[in-house]
Amino acid sequence: MKVGLITLSCAYNYGAVLQAYATERFLNQHGYDAVLIDYVTERYQIDTKDYVYKTTVRWKKNALTRFVWKYTWHKNDVKCRDFFRNFVEEHIPKTKVYYSNEELKEDLPDCDAFISGSDQIWNTDFSWDKQPDYPFFLDFVPDDRKKIAYSSSFGEVHMSTEVKQKVRKLLERYDAIAVRENSGKNLVEDMGLSAKVVLDPTMLCDRTVWDELAASRLLKQDYVLLFQINPNKELLHFAEEFARSQKMNLVILSANPAHKKFLGRKAIYLPKVEEWLSYFKYASYVLTDSFHACVFSVQFERQFAPVVDQRNTKRISSVLELLDVKKRIVEVNDLHALPGVLKSTIHYDDVKQKLKGLQKDSGEWLLNKLETD
């Protein structure tokens, strides 16, 4: 069976490309011919003429501000896009590029079944008009083809009644729905439909997949690792103090070179995906506000502390609750708790047992839905 996967693989972050990689690997390991549907959503069509007008008030004012934008922010976006694009090109079989729902309908990928997910593909805040991004709801797929959602996420769920009605009609066409967070399950059930909570694909895959992909150890000495999606100077300060207290170096990773003004020049910007994984694999401690950084901290059995605010609370707490390590979460306005959390040891024998059971449950659900007529 040929399976088409559509997900947020065009995003400029490590989690986005690694969850696409993981889904493709899992399906291929179980005998399916998986291909990534290479859809670039409008939010990431950065070379279009009207992109600057849609994305920012600050830079679209006049010719001068647009010129400055082109050689600063836009230049940085192109660099990030090309960096993560190279990983996808090298590691994930894919279709031609599609830029709209209409293009997908006109030239439907030749697949027997279609899967949407994982990541925040159903987060309507990601669309300029706050409306559903129809390809991510498999709107282009004919009624006679199987449609499955696996580990799809609504993000932090801000949806009007009107949009919720549209989403319900789109989800009604699915043969099966699995989401990444309890909040997503509740939202789908509020629409009168059923959904199952499953693992993100990066946890569905066995650790051996990540051991194979990760680069060998890059630093001989022990170190504390900091990875932030949304830079916070206070968290940076706490990380520096904690590393100093442990007599370790602090390694700072960033997926965005534009963060230099927050993180400084000593941070490592856009390390290769394989290197990014390696830094997590060999870290003594990890501090992060990233969902997927938490995932790989667990996969590599690291001592870590997630820092949350209203932007990431639900997606991080949901998976850590499943693994019974939710107590490690620290609120961004309560950073003084970080040292105590980091020094409290995670007993990974228990976590691994829970993860193994969840992997079996999630994997069997997906394979069963693909095999069922």
Image (cartoon, grey):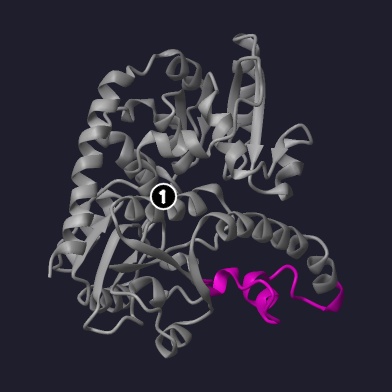
Q: Residue at x 25, y 36 (%)?
A: 322
Q: Residue at x 57, y 32 (%)?
A: 278
Left or right: 87 in relation to 297: right
Against 82, residue 285 (above or below) is above
- The amino acid sitting under disc 1 is Ala
Q: Which residues are magenta?
A: 39-64
Q: Residue at x 41, y 24 (%)?
A: 301
61 within the magenta span: yes
Q: Residue at x 53, y 79 (%)?
A: 99
Residue 189 can be seen in this image: no
Residue 230, how many percent across, how many down?
58, 45
For label 1, the crowd category at 10 Å Cα-Cα, with few meaning under 14, some 14 to 19 and many 20 or more, is many
Residue bearing mark 1: 22
Residue 159, how many percent across, how many down?
35, 67
Query: Which quarter of the image is occupied by the C terminus?
Result: bottom left
Residue at the farthest right position:
64
Question: Relative to the observer, which residue lies in front, 337 or 239?
Answer: 239
